[in-house]
Image (cartoon, helix red, strand yellow):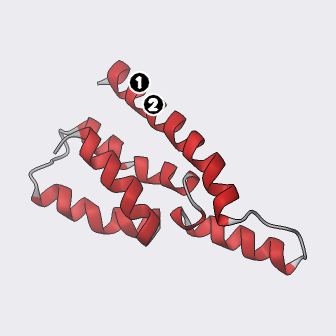
């Protein structure tokens, strides 16, 4: 399983499940695919699910909690589209940094 597949699946499915539940489920998929403790870059790439929280409001439960807290205090929170506009840029930058880090360290 390649790093590109792991990062893409992590980012996409973290939008549906949120990042922590996704990793809890997907680590079993990786293990059943033959990825062991010796596959450092693949396990590190699974951490890309943490940057998925930057992509959309639903990418991390903490985003939802913060937006709800803001709304309870009558503070105008981000709309989904406002969050997404910035989130796409940040997620792409973060993903590039992940790949450079992996190239330099593995």
Q: In the picture shown, does residue 73 fall above or below 91?
A: below
Callout 1 crowding tier (Cα within 10 Å): few <14, some 14–19, many ≥20: few
Q: In the picture shown, does residue 24 fall above or below 55?
A: below
Q: Quadrant of the C terminus?
A: top left
The image quadrant that residue 24 belongs to is bottom left
Direction from residue 30 to residue 71 in the image, left or right: right
Residue at the image point whose x is 16% and y is 57% from the top: 31
**Residue 19 at what x, y percent from top left?**
45, 62
Direction from residue 27 to residue 57 in the image, left or right: right
CA gap between label 2 and label 1 equals 6 Å
Residue at the image point whose x is 73% and y is 70% from the top: 67
> Which secondary structure lies at badge 1?
helix
The image quadrant that residue 13 belongs to is bottom left
Q: Furthest residue to the top? A: 104
**Residue 14 at what x, y percent from top left?**
42, 62
Q: Which residue is mark 1?
A: 100
Direction from residue 32 to residue 39 in the image, left or right: right
Q: In the picture shown, does residue 72 fall above or below 50?
A: below
The disc at residue 65 is none
Residue at the image point whose x is 15% and y is 48% from the top: 35
Dot 2 and dot 1 residues touching (CB under 8 Å): yes
Q: Which residue is mark 2?
A: 96
Callout 2 crowding tier (Cα within 10 Å): few <14, some 14–19, many ≥20: few
Residue at the image point whose x is 27% and y is 62% from the top: 26
Q: Quadrant of the N terminus?
A: top left
**Residue 7 at what x, y percent from top left?**
34, 46
> Which secondary structure lies at badge 2?
helix
Q: Nearer the viewer, mark 2 or mark 1?
A: 2
């Amino acid at each position: 399983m390649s790093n590109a597949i792991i990062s893409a699946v992590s980012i996409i499915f973290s939008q549906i499940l949120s990042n922590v539940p996704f990793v809890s489920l997907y680590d079993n998929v990786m293990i059943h695919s033959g990825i062991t403790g010796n596959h450092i870059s693949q396990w590190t790439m699974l951490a890309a699910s943490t940057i998925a929280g930057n992509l959309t409001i639903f990418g991390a439960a903490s985003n939802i909690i913060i937006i709800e807290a803001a709304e309870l205090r009558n503070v105008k929170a981000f709309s989904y589209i406002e969050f997404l506009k910035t989130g796409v840029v940040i997620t792409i930058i973060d993903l590039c940094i992940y790949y450079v880090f992996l190239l330099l360290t593995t």
